[in-house]
C-alpha cells in the first residue's frame, strides 16, 4: 500500500514539475515574440525586406537615370 502511494506521489510530483517547466518555457517564448514584435515596430524602414520597398527603390533608380539623361541632354 505504501509503495503504491509513493509511486503515485512521485508520478504526481514529476507531472507537476514538467507542467511548471513547460509553463515557464511557454512564457519565455511569448516574451521573446513580444520583444521581436516591439523591435519590428520600432524599426520604421526594414532594409529591403519588403517587396514594396524594392519596387520603390527601382522606381527611384529609374527616375534618377532619366534625370541624369536629361542633364546630359540625351533624348530618351
Image: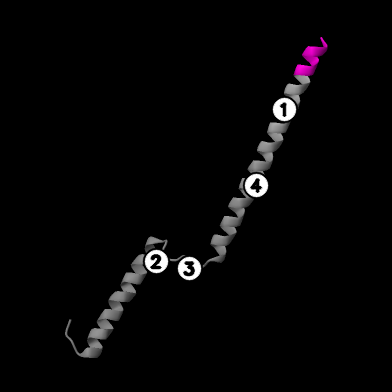
Q: Which mark is residue 45?
A: 3
Q: Is residue 28 above or below residue 48?
A: above
Quadrant of the image occupied by residue 8:
top right
Q: Secondary structure at mark 4?
A: helix
Q: Secondary structure at mark 3?
A: loop
Residue bearing mark 2: 53
Label 4 CA crowd tier, 10 Å (few <14, some 14–19, many 20+): few
- Residue 15 lies left or right of residue 72; in this view the side is right
Residue 62 locus on image (x, y percent): 28, 75
- Dot in front, 1 or 2: 1
Q: Residue at horizontal 61%, vertical 53%?
A: 34
On whether residue 15 falls in the magenta region, the answer is: no
Disc 1 to disc 2: CB gap under 8 Å: no
First in residue order: circle 4 vs circle 3: 4
Q: CA distance from mark 4 to mark 3?
A: 28 Å
First in residue order: circle 4 vs circle 2: 4
27 or 70: nearer the viewer = 27
Residue 40 locus on image (x, y percent): 54, 61
Disc 2 to disc 3: CB gap under 8 Å: yes
Q: CA distance from mark 2 to mark 3?
A: 9 Å
Assign the N terminus to one quadrant of the image.
top right
Q: Is residue 48 above or below residue 37?
A: below
Q: Residue at horizontal 51%, vertical 68%?
A: 44
Q: CA distance from mark 4 to mark 1?
A: 21 Å
Residue bearing mark 1: 14
**Count of number-bearing discs:** 4
Q: Residue at horizontal 22%, vertical 89%?
A: 72
First in residue order: circle 3 vs circle 1: 1
Amino acid at each position: 500500500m505504501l509503495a503504491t502511494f509513493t509511486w503515485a506521489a512521485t508520478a504526481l510530483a514529476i507531472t507537476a514539475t514538467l507542467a511548471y517547466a513547460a509553463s515557464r518555457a511557454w512564457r519565455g517564448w511569448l516574451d521573446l515574440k513580444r520583444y521581436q514584435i516591439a523591435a519590428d515596430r520600432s524599426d520604421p524602414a526594414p532594409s529591403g525586406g519588403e517587396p514594396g520597398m524594392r519596387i520603390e527603390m527601382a522606381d527611384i533608380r529609374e527616375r534618377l537615370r532619366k534625370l541624369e539623361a536629361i542633364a546630359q541632354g540625351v533624348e530618351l
